[in-house]
Amino acid sequence: MQFLTLVAVLLLMSAAVYRMGRGRAQVLAGTEARSLHSLPSYYGYYVALWCGIPALLLIVGWLSLEPFILRSLVVDALPTEAKALSPARLSLLMNEVRQLAASGDFRFSSGPVASAAAEQYRGLRATSFGAMTVLALSLAVGGAVYGMRAISPKLRARNRVESAVKVFLVASSTLAIFTTIGIVLSLLFESLLFFQKVPLTDFLFGLNWSPQTAMRADQVGASGSFGAVPLFAGTLLISVIAMFVAVPIGLLSAIYMAEYAHPKFRSIAKPLLEVLAGIPTVVYGFFAVLAVAPFLRSIGQSVGISIASESAMATGIVMGVMIIPFISSLSDDVICAVPDSLRHGAYGLGATRSETIKQVVIPAALPGIIGGILLAVSRAIGETMIVVMAAGLSAHLTANPFASVTTVTVQIVTLLVGDQEFDSPKTLSAFALGLVLFVVTLALNVVALHVVRKYREKYD
Amino acid sequence: MTEAVEQLRASVIAGKVGARLQRRYAAEKRFRVYGVAAIAIALSFLAVLLVSIIAQGYSAFVQTEVRLTLDLDPAVIDPDGKRDHATLSSADYATVIRNALLARFPDADDRVGRRELSHMMSQGAELEVRKLVLADPSVIGSRREMWLPVAAPVDQLIKGNMERAPDKGGQFKERELARIDALKADGSLQTRFNRWLFTEGDSRQPELAGLWGAVVGSFYSLLVTLALSFPLGVATAVYLEEFASRSRWTDVIEVNINNLAAVPSIVFGLLGLEIFLNLFELPRSSPLVGGLVLTLVSLPTIIIAARVALKAVPPWIREAALGLGASRLQMVAHHVLPLAMPGILTGTIIGMARAVGESAPLLMIGMVAFIVDVPATPMDPATALPVQVYLWAASPERAFIERTSAAIIVLLCFLAVMNATAIYLRKRFERRW
């Protein structure tokens, strides 16, 4: 809250300084407006930037370094026996200290060491915030004074302001790259820790997944086992079922919309189909649990098959429904992009419309359609909420669509929701699963985009 | 002779060709039917989904309440007569309510009967009476008529979600049912608008659980997301479309944006957990971190939409501006951006609508905790609307199914409003050149 006030004060100062700068430029110009290099408002922006930017940069830098410095200061001040703790225990202690300091309520403290450290942490943080406020405000005032001093008719204010804006544009466009790097680094870092404890081959090819590590070291199955094949198989099973639902329905409706439908029908049916894409996945998950799974169960009972209440079938069908609009809109685009000359040629040879579609349009659009299907597969693999709510938790290696299976994303969620210890293989395995998920979906996307682009070039 | 042969041949051909034509036309018809059937199946899924959710959820917007004449007896509420805040906030309002019920059903005055009466009312009833007394202590000693909420099982019974007969899974004994019927018969038991749903945070008691905390949490997250992703997205799009020349560097950026658009959202959650929570030690479960993660999720959508909108502005606008002496930045800021703004805003709203419905990354950063308080700032722990749906869906009580559906209806209403705004903007301001 204090922080937001500080930022608001800085923004207000910049706004005030903008007016001052503009006024000063107008005074300098007097009646001869042409003697100024730039329009007066650029002088205002120039001063406002000098006032706001250095202070905001200082705040960002300060806040990103603060946790590390505070941590090392607090750790230094710990009694020697606490410093001798293993790094993992020490980080647990520091977590507690931070939480105590944040809540300000020491009743649940684990001991005097933690309480004292939390007290110190609180004090340091208050000091740090005070110092930051003073520095930022004086930087803002200093910047404003410098900017005001620099104003003269010859100052190339517009060029200066424009180059500052351009720096901002370039910087924000690199954010996408930093995000990718951030994803790769954070996944890789924890995964490497995981693979130090569990060999990569055990993880990728092991057939048994039971990440529950025991409390005591001598308990049965104390090490947990991290063979992820059942998860991959479960993910694949559900995705295949989803594709069996989504591809025929999505493709046929796209063909009908693009080739047959009256424009009026199209203008109503197409947005309605897109509504399916706009419904949050958590709603689909609830729908699967509430309606589809019980419905399948009752059908199964009347036919005499036993269908698990968390069956891959129910999950897959609902996921397929979610993906229908994705496939239909992508296929619609590529079908519409097939040149009419091909269709007219086929009609001229006496083909009916469906023959034209099946033998000319679809083959021509096939690369684009396959690209769309690949993108849909990658979405099905990464889909989380539907499977978390409707699929099972325990890992079975089975190809029976009526059994309960679990998926990669379900396991990531179950492993990371709740208390986490960042030194146990159980928590770290979630990051290894995330890495696999990221690599697989990335590969699918790269291939799909490549195929689609190749196809586009053919008809452009 | 030859004429006859010709005729014969013609008729054979006509028969064969005719049969073939028939088959081909039949195939044509079948194919059309497949197409219509596919659309019908997809739309009927949509209809079934919406109808089943609304059918389950509409009843959660009302709550059964009982009209009771309370005797606010000073001997029960404040025996010492101090009238101070501490005494009044911890007073025994349960007894006040039970006495009112006993006055209505004098035959229930035994140990079992009293327990049955207490179980009829929600804990929210006590909170209501407490609120009344704390707001104005002078009501103590008077008699008051109030509408108070009943417990969830009674509510479900009245709404017809629970069987009456005890042997079919009903929870109530004959005489309890008789009491409920007696109250209903004289109009003292009615379903009224469920105000708790829109004013309270989460609760373990289904009849007191509200959405307000989640709505506020979603609102703060969205505020952070909008404040970051709109300027950053527009800046990226402007740079790529208007300033950057095609180079290897811009290719790398483009490929990155396209790939990020297809990365599963849960991976962004892992990034948030690792970078924002573990590295920068930002507050766990807070809408601030939720907003940061959702920014990364929605940025690619906004960038792509903004680029399409910028591309749609015809080049002669730019040439005219440059020809009159504008600098490149002036051309963009004064001419191109205003013309592209409706398209950019439409894309932004659609990106925000997606962020509102997104829940997987929020699970990773701890926005799934059970939080009763309504968050006051973006730094306080909170949940979001879709996460609340997930949490309630996991609760076993029958009454929570109804509330989950109600939460979904509220969520879908928000999304419908956002998307309708986007469509309106597009229709109203779209320009064809």
Image: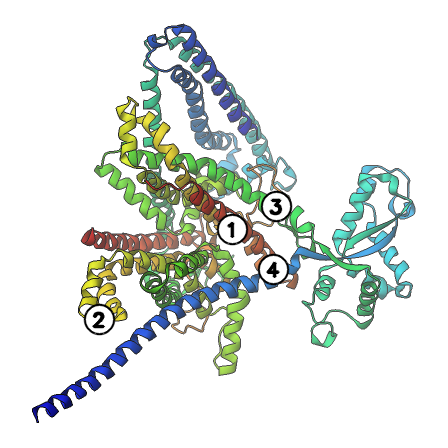
Secondary structure of residue under mark 2: loop
Cα separation between marks 4 and 1: 27 Å
Are dots 4 and 1 on a single chain?
Answer: yes
Q: Given contact means CB atoms under 8 Å apart, are the residues at marks 4 and 2 in contact?
A: no
Secondary structure of residue under mark 4: loop
Cα separation between marks 3 and 1: 21 Å
How packed mark 4 is, by other alpha carbons closer than 10 Å (few <14, some 14-19, many 20 or more), is some
Q: Position of residue A85 (x, y in %)?
A: 48, 41
Q: Given contact means CB atoms under 8 Å apart, are the residues at marks 4 and 1 in contact?
A: no
The residue pinned by badge 3 equals: B213
Cα separation between marks 4 and 2: 59 Å
Give the left or right position of residue B298, taking residue A291 as reference. Answer: left
Q: Chain of mark 3?
A: B
Q: Position of residue B175 (x, y in %)?
A: 83, 70
Q: What's the residue type where badge 2 is placed?
A: Ala
The residue pinned by badge 2 equals: A351
Q: What's the residue type where badge 1 is placed?
A: Ala
Give the left or right position of residue A118, taking residue B272 as reference. Answer: right
Q: What's the residue type where badge 3 is placed?
A: Gly
Q: What's the residue type where badge 4 is placed?
A: Ser
Query: Sequence-wise, which precedes: disc 4 or disc 1?
Result: 4
Q: Residue at x 40, y 70 (%)?
A: B37
Q: Chain of mark 1?
A: B
Q: Chain of mark 4?
A: B
Mark 4 vs mark 2, foreground winner is 2
Are dots 1 and 2 on a single chain?
Answer: no
Q: Given contact means CB atoms under 8 Å apart, are the residues at marks 1 and 2 in contact?
A: no
Of B412 and A65, which appears nearest the observer?
B412
The residue pinned by badge 4 equals: B395
Secondary structure of residue under mark 1: helix
How packed mark 3 is, by other alpha carbons closer than 10 Å (few <14, some 14-19, many 20 or more), is many
